Image (spheres, grey):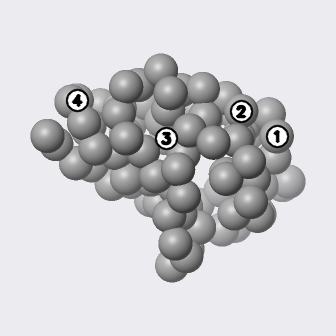
Amino acid sequence: MANATRTITINDPVGIHARPAAQFAAAVTGSGCTVTIAKGDGAPVAANSILAIMGLGVKNGDDVTITVEGDNAEQVADDLINTLTAAN
């Protein structure tokens, strides 16, 4: 099973709010992979949970790291980063 990690800086003025959290969680669920998301050096949370993502309190300028485990992890990680940045 492959692993992939990506880190990005959130550039949305309101950070990760309900809509992008919901879109990201739906994409994670659809990927069939195990995915976590972490803010800065904080503990990772399940990325398929809107409430867990919202609970991170990600604001504009914060770094987030996603870790993907599963088949096609590299492609899934790239797709999820695109989903997160497009939702902003």
Q: In front of the other: label 3 or label 2?
A: 2
Circle 4 SS class:
loop
| Towards the viewer: 61 or 38 | 38
Closer to the N terminus: mark 2 or mark 4? 2
| Towards the viewer: 41 or 61 | 41
Closer to the N terminus: mark 4 or mark 1? 1
Residue 39 x %, y %: 59, 67
Residue drawn 49% across the image and 41% down it: 81
Q: Are marks 3 and 1 in contact (CB under 8 Å)?
A: no
Closer to the N terminus: mark 3 or mark 2? 2
Q: In this view, which residue lies farthest toward the top? A: 30
Residue drawn 46% across the image and 52% down it: 36
Q: Quadrant of the C terminus?
A: top right
Q: In this view, which residue lies farthest toward the left? A: 1
Q: Which residue is mark 4?
A: 72
Q: Which residue is mark 1?
A: 18
Q: Which residue is mark 2?
A: 22
Amino acid bearing label 4: Asn
**Marks 4 and 3, Cα distance to the nearest angstrom?**
14 Å
Above-or-below relation of 43 to 8: below
Amino acid bearing label 1: Ala
Residue drawn 74% across the image and 48% down it: 51
